[in-house]
Every structure is written in structure tokens, then in C-alpha cells.
Amino acid sequence: MSWAVLPAAGRGLRFGAGLPKQYLELAGRPLIEHSLRAVLDHDDVDGAMVVLAAGDRHWPGWREIGGKPVLVCTGGAERAESVLAGLRALPATVSEDQWVLVHDAARPCLRRADLARLLAVGRADPVGALLAAPVRDTLKRADHLGKSQATEPREWLWRALTPQLFRRGGLTRALDAALRAGVAVTDEAMAMERLGLRPCLVEGAEDNIKVTTPADLALAEFILGKDR
Ligand code: C5P
């Protein structure tokens, strides 16, 4: 069994709306409700810890969804600090060895089949796993003048998505070590890689987008409306 940690302490500054992006309305509900329901949908997910910004006035105050507990705690200035706070705030009944999903509150279009595959593959892996999508564009390396100086091979390159699945204890230690070392970790897998560990890449749907701009919100609405 697993718990989910949902970092939702971002202030959504890039979005330019009055409301943090995780609370914008998407298909008649706050965006974060889609992300939460998507992870709680799996039978093996017992509950969720939502990490909120200090003084967040927009959180709807849910205590459970679909009969599963929804707890909250306060995050930090960086996403990694928020995830670490969420891991530490999990109930004591979640052991160090238990698997924890980390899923961005800003990713409302997670598919049921992707979550199921991530859990199946990740729990069979000694380290854990993340959803990811192969890079499809041609990649250019720029020089300092903004000119293209080389084309990078994309064969081994993937875009990291969420959820990511790691054991509570291992991920807590990895994030703590990265933050103490002053490393800007942008996802959980990066904190594990720093320690020489190799999480499994599980190919996920490209449309598991992170809502960052108003155009993404319209795209997410379209994706959720598709036959999935
Ligand atoms: O800012 P970005 O889009 O990378 O954020 C990804 C997720 O991390 C969002 O759900 C956001 O709310 C969360 N976050 C957080 N704490 C921060 C920054 C971002 O929980 N300090």
C-alpha cells in the first residue's frame, strides 16, 4: 500500500492569474481536485498528504475524498522543500520502507493506466520509478549569443513527469541531502540519481501535462474531455 504526497505550495507566479494555478477552475472543479482524485483512484493508494503554501486561503478544506484521508501540511520556498515537508508529515503508520507517490498538484490529466503501470514497475524495482516521456523534438545547444552551435542526440533523453514512486525513507534522505548540499533538485528522481541510484523510467502519456500557462489550462480541459 502507498500514500501520495502532492506538492501544491507553488504560488503560480508564471501563470499571472490572481489565484494560484492549482485552484483555477478546470472542467467545473478546482484543478487540484483532478490531480488528487487521479492518484486516490488506485486501490493501493491509501491517502494523500497535500503540501500547501503558508497562509493558503484557497484550499477547499477536504478531509477525505472517496473515503480516503486527505491531510495537509505546510511547504517551503522550493518544490523539493515542499515534498520533503510532505514526506515528514506523513502518518507514523507509513513505514520507512513503504512506497510513496509524489505527484504535482498541477498535473490534472494523469491516466489511470499510467498510474497502475508506474506502481507495478516501481514496486518491483530496487530503487523506484517515474513516469516519463521520450523527447520527440530535435534538440539544439545554444551558444552565449543565442545561436545554434550543435544538435544533440535525443535517443537517450526523456522528459520527467509525475507521479514518481520511491520508498519514504530513501527519498526523505535523498532530498534532505540534496537540499543541504544546495543542489537545485527539480524532481525526486534527480535527488536519487545524485546518490548513484538509477530509477526506472516508465513511459507515460504525453498529455500528462503540467499546467503552467493559460494555454495549458485550455489544453488540460480538452484532454480531460477526451475519451480516455
Ligand atoms: O512551479 P512548478 O510548476 O514547477 O510546480 C510544480 C508543483 O510543485 C506544483 O504543484 C506546485 O504547487 C508545487 N510547488 C510546491 N512548493 C514550491 C513550488 C512548487 O509545492 N515551493
Image (cartoon, rainbow, N blue to C red):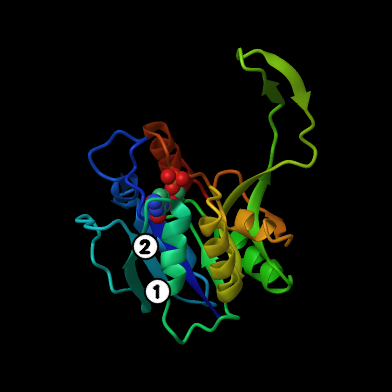
x then y, percent, for residue 174: 59, 64
Among the 4 quarters of the image, the one containing residue 75: bottom left
Q: Nearer the viewer, residue 120 or 93?
A: 93
Tag 1–tag 2 contact (CB < 8 Å): yes
Give, as a three-letter code, the residue at label 2: Val
**Above or below 89: residue 163:** above
Q: Looking at mark 2, is its residue's CB closer than 8 Å to ligand 1?
A: yes
Please indicate whether residue 133 sits to the left or right of residue 11 in the image: right
Please indicate whether residue 1 sits to the left or right of residue 194 in the image: left
Please indicate whether residue 218 sits to the left or right of residue 80 in the image: left
x then y, percent, for residue 198: 74, 60
Q: Is residue 201 visible?
A: yes
User: How far is mark 1 from mark 2, CA to CA?
Assistant: 9 Å
Q: Nearer the viewer, residue 166 or 88?
A: 88
Q: Nearer the viewer, residue 44 or 185?
A: 185
Q: Is residue 106 visible?
A: no
**Above or below 108: residue 68:** below
Q: Quadrant of the N terminus?
A: bottom right
- Tell me the residue at 25%/43% (across/down): 19
**Above or below 221: residue 38:** below
Q: Which mark is residue 51?
A: 2
Label 1 Cα crowd, 10 Å radius (few <14 / some 14-19 / many 20+): some
Total labels drawn: 2
